[in-house]
Image (cartoon, rainbow, N blue to C red):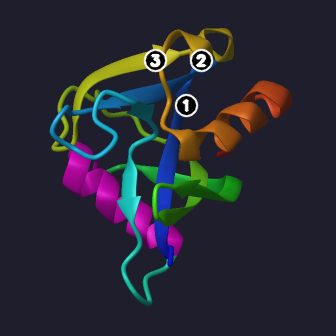
Amino acid sequence: MSTSIRVVGAVIHREGQVLACRRKPEKSAGGQWEFPGGKVESGEDPRVALARELKEELGLTDAVVGDLVTREVTPVGTNNIDLACYWVTTSADISSSTDHDAFEWLAPEDFAAVTWAKPDLPALQTIEQSGFPVEGQS
């Protein structure tokens, strides 16, 4: 029987690029690239969960969580990953993470240059097809 895991991801965008984070080798899906984020706790609002995860993982205290990019359920092993990705803006420099060992700012034409975690693929496809929010909006 599969377990459903509710997760949120941050599509942090600047100047036509998004932040991609590579999972540390010892983590599940180690070596794969993803949008930063994490699990939603029981009863927690997804946007609040995302702001909390960004503070815990990346030390971001000024992240502005905007509109939903995508929400898709992806089977991964015996789990169903219910991932909601949101547009996020921040003025902070991102240089360290509790869960990641590398960061890249990627334009849509460069998305294929790294190996993405399967649950993140629908958000990438939406960004490639629809582009980024209007500047000043997230």
Residue occupying image coordinates x 66% and y 33%: 124
Q: Mark 1 = which residue?
A: 13
- Residue 72 point in image, percent of width and height: 68, 58
The mark found on residue 105 in the picture is 3
- Magenta-colored stretch includes residue 111: no
Instruction: Please name the residue that numbered disc 2 is placed on.
Output: 111
Instruction: Tell me the distance, in whole angstroms, between the alpha carbons under discs 1 and 2.
Output: 13 Å
- Residue at 21 percent across and 26 percent down: it is 95
In this picture, residue 61 sits left or right of residue 8: left
In the image, 113 versus 135, the foreground residue is 113
Residue 74 shows in the view = yes
- Disc 3 crowd rating (10 Å Cα; few below 14, some 14-19, many 20+) is some
Kindly tell me whether residue 133 is visible in this rendering: no
Frontmost of labels 1 and 2 is 2
Q: Which mark is residue 59?
A: none
Looking at the picture, which amino acid does disc 2 mark?
Phe
Which residue extends farthest right?
Answer: 129
Residues rendered magenta in the picture: 46-61
**Above/below status of 36 relative to 102:** below
Residue 130 drawn above or below residue 69 = above
Location of residue 12 in the rendering, given as x and y in whole percent from the top left corner: 50, 37
In the picture shown, does residue 88 fall above or below 8? above
Tag 2 or tag 1, which sits nearer the N-term?
1
Q: In terms of secondary structure, where does tag 2 sit? A: helix
Q: Which residue lies furthest to the front in this view?
A: 1
Q: In which quarter of the image is residue 41?
A: bottom left
